[in-house]
Each structure stands twice: as C-alpha cells, then as structure tokens.
Amino acid sequence: MRRDSRLLVGLTIALVFISAPHAAEDFQYGEFGRAGIKTIVAGAILGALYALQAYGCVLAGRGDPTAAVVLGLAGAIWCVGAVLIHGSEVLAPGPYREGWISKTLVVAIVLLGASLAGLAVLQRGTKQ
C-alpha cells in the first residue's frame, strides 16, 4: 500500500465504525421513512456506500492512485448526507435521539467525511 493511502484507509475504517451505529439509529428512528425512502432501498444504498468504501480500500492496498478518488467521493457523500439530513437537528438545542452520543456520531461522520474528501483532493492535486 502506498504511504499516502494509509491515512485515507485509516480514516475510512474509522468512518465505517462510526457510521454503522449511526445508520442503525437512523433505521430505529424511521429516518428514511420520514424522507419517503423505503427501508429496503435505504438498506441497499447503505450497502452500496459501504461496498464503495471497501472497493476504495482494495484499490489502496493495490497501490492504485484512483483509491483517493473513490474514498474521497465516499467521504463526501457521508459528509453532505449527514449535514443535509441531520444538520439542523444536531445544531438545535435540546435532546436529540440518544443524547450527546447521537450528536457526536453525526459530528464525527461530518468531520471524517470532510477530511477524506479534502485529503483526496490534496493527494490528487499533488500527483498532477
């Protein structure tokens, strides 16, 4: 694995571990139903996003420079999705789902996703 890919892979693994309990919480609270998305469709989208992240990690392990693009794209999707879906709820005063832990998960998803996207852009920019 290329040295510059290690950080991308590490951040991706952290994002998977943080996003999994958050996604379970989304299903528990019926988040997708409120948005008009069927549970089966939401599950398929989530699975596809995790598959994209796994594919990016495989590319990184093979030393493929497109790994940065794949992992950066996945990070951007997580970041933008978390902001659009949960941003106003997390910033609002008062209780949110399971309390501070739920807010922390969303903030971590935003920060990790943005970090992945930014790092990918920086890595691709230095290669050109």
Image (spheres, rainbow, N blue to C red):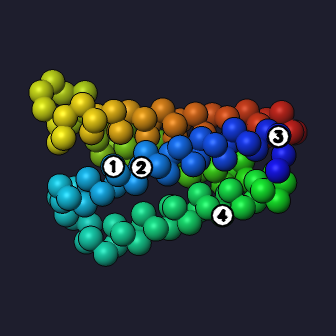
| Residue in the image at 35% along x and 51% along y | 21
Badge 3 amino acid:
Arg
The answer to the question of whether label 1 and label 4 lie on touching residues, with beta carbons closer than 8 A, is no
Label 1 sits on a secondary structure element that is helix
In the picture as drawn, the residue positioned furthest to the right comes out as 128
Q: Give the spatial CA distance, label 2 vs label 4.
A: 17 Å
Mark 1 or mark 4: which comes first in sequence?
1
Badge 1 amino acid:
His
Mark 4 surroundings: few (<14), some (14-19) or many (≥20) residues within 10 A: some
In the picture as drawn, the residue positioned furthest to the bottom comes out as 40
Badge 2 amino acid:
Ser
Label 3 sits on a secondary structure element that is helix
Q: Give the spatial CA distance, label 1 vs label 2.
A: 5 Å
Label 2 sits on a secondary structure element that is helix
Going by the image, does 126 lie left or right of 92? right
Residue 35 in view (yes/no): no
Mark 2 or mark 4: which comes first in sequence?
2
The answer to the question of whether label 4 and label 3 lie on touching residues, with beta carbons closer than 8 A, is no
State the residue position of label 2: 19
Image coordinates of residue 35 in percent, x first then y, are: 22, 58
Image coordinates of residue 30 in percent, x first then y, are: 18, 59
Badge 4 amino acid:
Tyr
State the residue position of label 3: 3
